[in-house]
Each structure stands twice: as structure tokens, then as C-alpha cells.
Image (spheres, grey):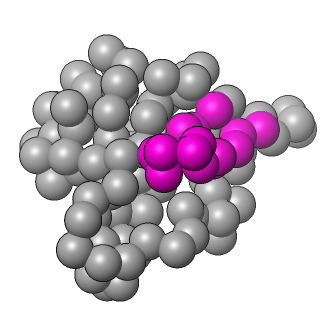
Amino acid sequence: MSEAPQFSVDRDTSGALHLRGEISYLNAARALREAPQHLSGESATDLDLRGLRHADSATLAVLIAWSARARRHGARLNYTHAPPGLRNLARLCDVEQLLGLN
């Protein structure tokens, strides 16, 4: 069995979040448990995906779940700098606007 890839979500001094590493089917359950915290209020929080090394359908599913969790808390996540492969997959699944990809 392959070792699960690593990922982290860090907040910078401006409040933006940065995803680094990889979310795949090997660590998607952990990623769901470790959703970005402290998201509430009326403003949107940007989550920069520039540091994402690989994206597949498991990655997309996790991002959708994170967005849904944020909305349940009255917040919104906008995913920025999405890799082309993830953007294409989101477009194919018709969730690009739902995720606020920009």
C-alpha cells in the first residue's frame, strides 16, 4: 500500500489560506476531517491552490465538501490559482461556479 501524500492548509498574515501538497483518494478522508477552520461571517475567504501538486476527482470532492461546510457556518470559500487540470475537472462536473474558482 502506498504512503498517503501530505498536505497542509496555512493562513498568511492577510488572512488568506494556502493549500500545499496533495489531496488524493489516499488521504481524502483525513482532508475532510481537517477542513479549514474558523470560517464564518459574511466575507469570503480565499484558499490559494497554487501549492497543490496533484489534483484528481478526490481533490475536487474534498474542495466541494469544504465549501459546503463553510456555507453551513455562514462563510464562503473562494479557490484561487487552481491548477488547469482541477479547473477542467470542475468545469466538466459543472461545479466551477459553485467553488468560486477564479
Magenta residues? Answer: 6-20
Q: Of 102 and 88, which appears nearest the observer?
A: 102
- Point 57% across, 24% down: residue: 51
Question: Does 53 appear above or below 95?
Answer: above
Is 15 part of what is drawn in magenta? Answer: yes
Q: Main secondary structure of the magenta part?
A: strand
- Point 56% across, 64% down: residue: 35
Question: Does 3 appear above or below 10?
Answer: above
Question: Does 75 appear above or below 7?
Answer: below
Residue 23: x %, y % from top left: 60, 40
* Residue 58 placement, left or right of 80: right
Is 79 part of what is drawn in magenta? Answer: no
- Point 33% across, 33% down: residue: 80
Q: Which residue is most to the front? A: 13
Specify the quadrant of the image occupied by residue 45.
bottom left
Would residue 16 be visible to someone looking at this image? yes
Residue 42: x %, y % from top left: 22, 74
* Residue 93 placement, left or right of 55: left
Would residue 89 be visible to someone looking at this image? no
* Residue 92 placement, left or right of 43: left
